[in-house]
Image (cartoon, rainbow, N blue to C red):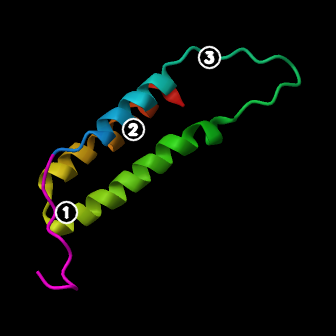
Amino acid sequence: MTVNEPPPIKDRILYWPTVLSAFWYWYFTLPPVEYSDGDLHPGPILILAGPVLSVAIAVLICIFWIGVGAWRRVLSTLILPLTVFLLIYFVGY
């Protein structure tokens, strides 16, 4: 291996997309908070900013791993976008 050559990538299953998917499931299924008049509360755009940003990052990482040929990492990372899209569809944000 030379100095300019990147280190080889070990193709393994990743756990962080599954943990993040479980967190977003927990976040979306929390009971709604009752706000009184004058309280500041996040709107739908701010509520969806975290999950959509994590999906965008996961898709960009998947595109990189497709180019490298790390298929186990691609499949394990695709759990996150699929989970978030299904949660948005079924919960109805």
Residue 5 lies in quadrant? bottom left
Q: Where is residue 1 in the image (x, y as percent from the top left)?
A: 11, 80
Residue 82 part of the magenta-drawn span? no
Residue under pointer 1:
66
Residue 80 lies in quadrant? top left
Q: Is residue 60 above or below residue 49?
A: below
Mark 2 → mark 1, Cα distance in angstroms: 21 Å
- Ranked by sequence position, the earlier of labels 3 and 1 is 3
Residue 4 part of the magenta-drawn span? yes
Q: Are marks 3 and 1 in contact (CB under 8 Å)?
A: no
Residue under pointer 3:
32
Disc 2 on helix, strand or loop? helix
Q: Residues within 10 Å of mark 2 (few under 14, many from 20)?
A: some
Q: Position of residue 55 (x, y in %)?
A: 41, 48
Q: How crowded is mark 3: few (under 14 residues within 10 Å), some or many (20 or more)?
A: few
Under mark 3, the amino acid is Pro
Q: Where is residue 59 in the image (x, y as percent from the top left)?
A: 34, 55
Q: Residues within 10 Å of mark 1 (few under 14, many from 20)?
A: some
Under mark 2, the amino acid is Phe
Under mark 1, the amino acid is Ile
Residue under pointer 2:
85
Labels in figure, total: 3
What's the magenta region? 1-12
